[in-house]
Image: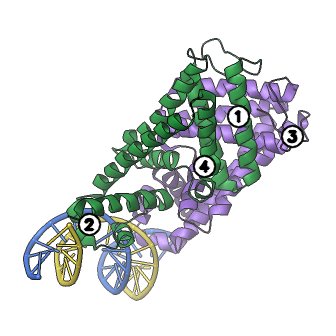
Chain colours: A green, B purple, C blue, D yellow
Amino acid sequence: MRGPQTRREIVGAADRLFYEAGFAHTSFADIASSVHISRGNFYYHFKSKDEILRAVIAHRQDSTRALLAAWDHAHPAARDRLSAFVRILSDNGEQIMLHGCPVGSLATELAKLMHESREDAVAVFSLFRDWLASQFSALGRAEDAEALALHLLMRSQGVATLFTAYRDKALLAREMAAMERWIDGAVSGEPSCQIGEDNRTCI
Amino acid sequence: MRGPQTRREIVGAADRLFYEAGFAHTSFADIASSVHISRGNFYYHFKSKDEILRAVIAHRQDSTRALLAAWDHAHPAARDRLSAFVRILSDNGEQIMLHGCPVGSLATELAKLMHESREDAVAVFSLFRDWLASQFSALGRAEDAEALALHLLMRSQGVATLFTAYRDKALLAREMAAMERWIDGAVSGEPSCQIGEDNRTCI
DNA sequence: GTCTATATGGGGATAGAC
DNA sequence: GTCTATCCCCATATAGAC
């Protein structure tokens, strides 16, 4: 009756190793030894590397939904929810510094591998994107909520990449503060928020 | 007397494959067959995978210096040079869509691998960063040129990552236009450009 | 300089005992 | 459900002929 538990442990270990070392560089032996089971036992639970990748991505989608629901519960105000999103950069600062953003780095790696699960990995991005768009809509920017959400997502990815490269905490703090100011400008309709002709968006 | 030529072809093929498929996923056989030489011959030129990685990174540094020098020559005005930087996103759009940014994706992959050449890969970022800072200095923002350069670099990385994920050309065009507007605001000291207390920077 | 042939290890995957 | 034993391929790397 310890099967389901072992399966969960495998997914957890694979999730962590795929993030820390990358999908291509993580072997079955790495995962198995991390969970303290034999390689043979591993194949009882997952028949291929692609199968465990699918399980890891599904688990990340569930985790992300749970995280967003927790933010919804903890922060009744949409503006505070956007700050919660910005704070993931510092909350996970040490991990991002060493391994990058789990969502962005997996999506890019699977793109290079032309892996069939690439779109499922991108779906984790979309969970954040849709949730961010909902907050901008609630703050009176329903018309371009999608573009604003993608802009904020874009910034978090850029900051994560540069923080991984330079490991500079001042850079992280500065850009997080700039993200907060940008959000304030966007939701208050300040002149700092310009609108283009065809593509409505904020600077 | 064809040795140097073969070596250059190996570096070129490895450069392309490390970018397209990733460092960990590229094998010697992939590189050798791409250059139409045998695996054995390969070892006459490079004794290990790390050695060819070092050669590829050195080559990328040279290419980047040449690119920046070409931009300097083609665009006498610093503002136009910044636009040239922004345009690499669309100039290399198809490649970025399929494989991400060569600089950012290699830096993140080597971070995950805890590879000794990680810092050399990051040095390519620094070539752009220093060059961008020079342009902002020339445009009257010498005091926070470094922060502005990193902000623009951050945006290009974020846009590249999201474009690789979503493959949405409207997103690319919209964010490139926003980068241009941000540059205009930064160099003209518009109210869209705010200054923080400790960390001077633009939104 | 370039080749073929080969040594050696690691990684994905299977068979079958317990 | 978990293990050991094993197969097979691929990848790095070397030896030596041409």
Total numbered labels placed on residues in the image: 4
Residue B155, placed above or below residue A30: above
Which residue shows up at 65% across the image and 38% down it? Answer: B156
Amino acid type for the residue under numbered disc 3: Glu
Eye-nearest disc, 1 or 2: 1
| Separation (CA) of disc 3 from disc 1 | 14 Å
Left or right, A113 with respect to C16, comes to right
**Residue position marked by numbered label 3 in the rendering:** B197
Eye-nearest disc, 4 or 1: 1
Q: Which mark is residue A180?
A: 1
User: Residue A109 location in percent, x, y?
Assistant: 46, 50
Kindly indicate whether the residue at mark 2 contacts the one at mark 1 (C-beta within 8 angstroms). Answer: no
In this view of the protein, can residue B1 be seen by the observer? no
Give the camera-side residue of A114 and B186: B186
User: Residue B74 location in percent, x, y?
Assistant: 78, 33
* Circle nearer the N terminus (4, 3): 4
| Separation (CA) of disc 4 from disc 1 | 24 Å
User: Residue B78 location in percent, x, y?
Assistant: 84, 33
Marks 1 and 2 belong to one chain: yes
**Residue position marked by numbered label 2 in the rendering:** A42
